[in-house]
Image (tube, helix red, strand yellow):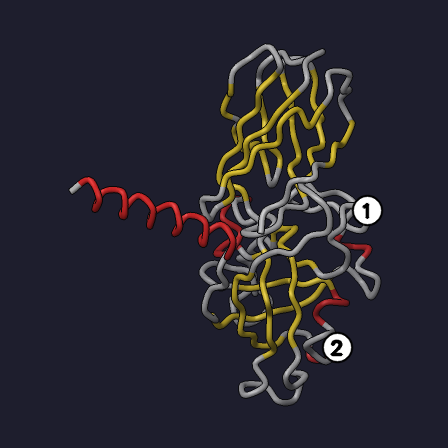
């Protein structure tokens, strides 16, 4: 029995290692539709409901999209990556055959209940819709088409560099934007720890912004982040004790 227990334990450890190495697994394909916004340079996509701000400097570029209510999950989907293929079999006139593009969710496409879901109310529930940055959309569709049927799947996010933490707010209110997240891309939970405190759970304030209501001035800060696929990473003393509100700190740690 002891030998069997050791074997089971070894297999469990091996399985956890392989799960970690493989990282986030792509989903199957789902049908939806896609439109575009933001202009030919995507300048109109800056900001957004995820809080990433300037998408150029934040590293997201022009391959981004706003998600409909059915996909956005009240901000819980911020940072997720999707591979989108124009459904040429359904619309050979406006789709570019065989083309695909991978985007990051950075914004929310609100419903418009004044318009029918099949004529202008593209983001009305329960539709799964992507309002893509125009340069990304034009990788798969012809401009004059305006809206195209698509096949989409969740895919691992591949980001340059490590996860970033931007600290805003005021005393007793740290509002931390967690960005440039690889792997699953979206965050399930976050914890913060000062050099003089234990771990404290943070709560999602809006989009990719997480808040703490502790007084942490003058302390080095650590974070523990779990993505929506259950992978947890530690960011130990990523923020020095001399930090100020308005600063951003980049780590060397990344999800896969």
In the displayed structure, 99 sits above or below 126; it is below
- The part of the image, by quadrant, that contains residue 132 is bottom right
Q: Is residue 171 left or right of residue 33?
A: right
Residue 113 in percent (x, y) is at 53, 57
Residue 254 in percent (x, y) is at 63, 44
In the displayed structure, 70 sits above or below 173; it is below
Q: CA distance from mark 1 to mark 2?
A: 27 Å
Disc 2 marks which residue?
Answer: 143
Mark 1 Cα within 10 Å, few/some/many (few <14, many 20+)?
A: few
> 23 or 97, which is in the foreground?
23
Q: Is residue 5 left or right of residue 57?
A: left
Q: Considering only order in the chain, which callout, 2 or 1, is on the residue closer to the N terminus?
A: 1
> 170 or 108, which is in the foreground?
170
> 86 or 237, which is in the foreground?
237
| Image quadrant containing the N terminus | top left
- What label sits on residue 57 in the rendered view? 1
């Amino acid at each position: 029995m002891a030998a069997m227990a050791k074997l089971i334990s070894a297999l469990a450890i091996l399985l956890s290692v392989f799960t970690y190495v493989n990282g986030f697994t792509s989903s199957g394909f789902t049908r939806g539709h896609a439109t575009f916004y933001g202009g030919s340079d995507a300048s109109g996509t800056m900001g957004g409901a995820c809080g990433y701000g300037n998408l150029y400097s934040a590293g997201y570029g022009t391959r981004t999209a706003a998600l409909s209510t059915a996909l956005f999950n009240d901000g819980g989907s911020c940072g997720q990556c999707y591979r989108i293929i124009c459904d040429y079999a359904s619309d050979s006139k406006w789709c570019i055959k065989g083309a695909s593009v991978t985007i990051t969710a950075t914004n929310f496409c609100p419903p418009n209940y004044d318009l029918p879901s099949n004529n202008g109310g593209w983001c009305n529930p329960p539709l799964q819709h992507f309002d893509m940055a125009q340069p990304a959309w034009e990788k798969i569709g012809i401009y004059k088409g305006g809206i195209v049927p698509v096949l989409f799947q969740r895919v691992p996010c591949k980001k340059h560099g490590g996860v970033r933490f931007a600290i805003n707010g005021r005393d007793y209110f740290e509002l931390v934007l967690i960005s440039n997240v690889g792997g699953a891309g979206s965050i399930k939970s976050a914890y913060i720890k000062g050099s003089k405190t234990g771990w404290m759970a943070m709560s999602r304030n809006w989009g990719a912004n997480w808040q703490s209501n502790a007084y942490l001035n003058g302390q080095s800060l650590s974070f523990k982040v779990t993505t929506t696929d259950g992978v947890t990473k530690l960011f130990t003393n990523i923020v020095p004790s001399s930090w100020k509100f308005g600063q951003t700190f980049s780590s060397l740690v990344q999800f896969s």
